[in-house]
């Protein structure tokens, strides 16, 4: 993902946890896990900083200790599974509190949460805190999975009508596919 981390993600959300869930890309039967790539987590954290989703103080704190990529991938997998079957299922939001207890957050002068510990604990605490906030603000009711058959990215549907994670990528692909199917070219 070196220097092209922005193009690796078809959609970047204002929510850190949505972007984290979307670090795995599934297209048909091929899976790309950006966290498995060389410097994948570092590149992703850099992208989140460039996009203004994380600030320098948060990232510096996270790098105070190593981040166990396997542990964060396990966390991602659990939440990806919960959100994939969101409708009608109970989601264990109380489990998120344990992560924020392991690495409490403090609020800096810009009202930004900063983990008290670095590394894995701090990273999971930051994600958990944002997820708890999003749940309390009703954001979880608006989480959708992209309707493109070759994309499984999550996004927040604020309009109630959105279908794709990115109109520029998945939306255009689907429209083009339907257009060619009508013409009998597919």
Image (cartoon, rainbow, N blue to C red):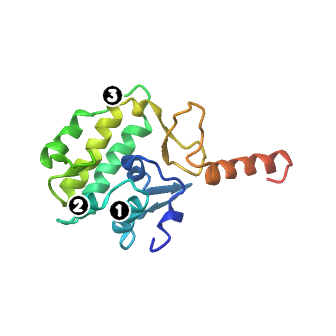
Q: Which residue is mark 3?
A: 90
Disc 3, SS:
loop
The residue that appears at 32% across and 57% down in the rendered structure is 55
In the foreground, 11 or 182: 11
Q: Which residue is mark 1?
A: 45
The residue that appears at 23% across and 61% down in the rendered structure is 62
Q: Residue furthest top?
A: 88
Please identify the quadrant where the N terminus is shown.
bottom left
- Examine the image and state in which quarter residue 120 appears: bottom left
Q: Which residue is mark 2?
A: 62
Q: Nearer the viewer, mark 3 or mark 1?
A: 1
**Callout 2 crowding tier (Cα within 10 Å): few <14, some 14–19, many ≥20:** many
Q: Earlier in the sequence, mark 3 or mark 2?
A: 2
Q: CB atoms at circles 1 and 2 under 8 Å apart? A: yes
Q: Position of residue 11 (x, y in %)?
A: 52, 53
Q: Residue furthest right?
A: 183
């Amino acid at each position: 993902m070196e220097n092209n981390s922005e193009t690796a993600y078809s959609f970047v959300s204002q929510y850190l946890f949505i972007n984290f869930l979307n670090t795995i890309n599934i297209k048909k039967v091929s899976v790309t896990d950006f966290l498995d790539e060389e410097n994948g987590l570092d590149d992703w954290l850099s992208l989140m900083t460039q996009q203004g989703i994380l600030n320098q103080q948060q990232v510096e704190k996270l790098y105070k200790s190593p981040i166990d990529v396997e542990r964060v991938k396990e966390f991602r997998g659990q939440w990806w599974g919960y959100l994939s079957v969101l409708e009608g299922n109970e989601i264990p939001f109380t489990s998120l509190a344990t992560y924020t207890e392991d690495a409490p957050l403090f609020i800096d002068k810009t009202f930004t949460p900063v983990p008290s510990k670095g590394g894995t604990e701090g990273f999971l605490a930051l994600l958990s805190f944002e997820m708890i906030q999003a749940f309390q603000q009703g954001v979880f009711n608006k989480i959708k999975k992209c309707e493109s058959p070759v994309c499984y990215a999550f996004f927040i549907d604020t309009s109630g009508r959105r279908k794709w994670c990115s109109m520029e990528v998945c939306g255009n692909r689907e429209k083009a596919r339907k257009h060619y199917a009508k013409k009998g070219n597919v």
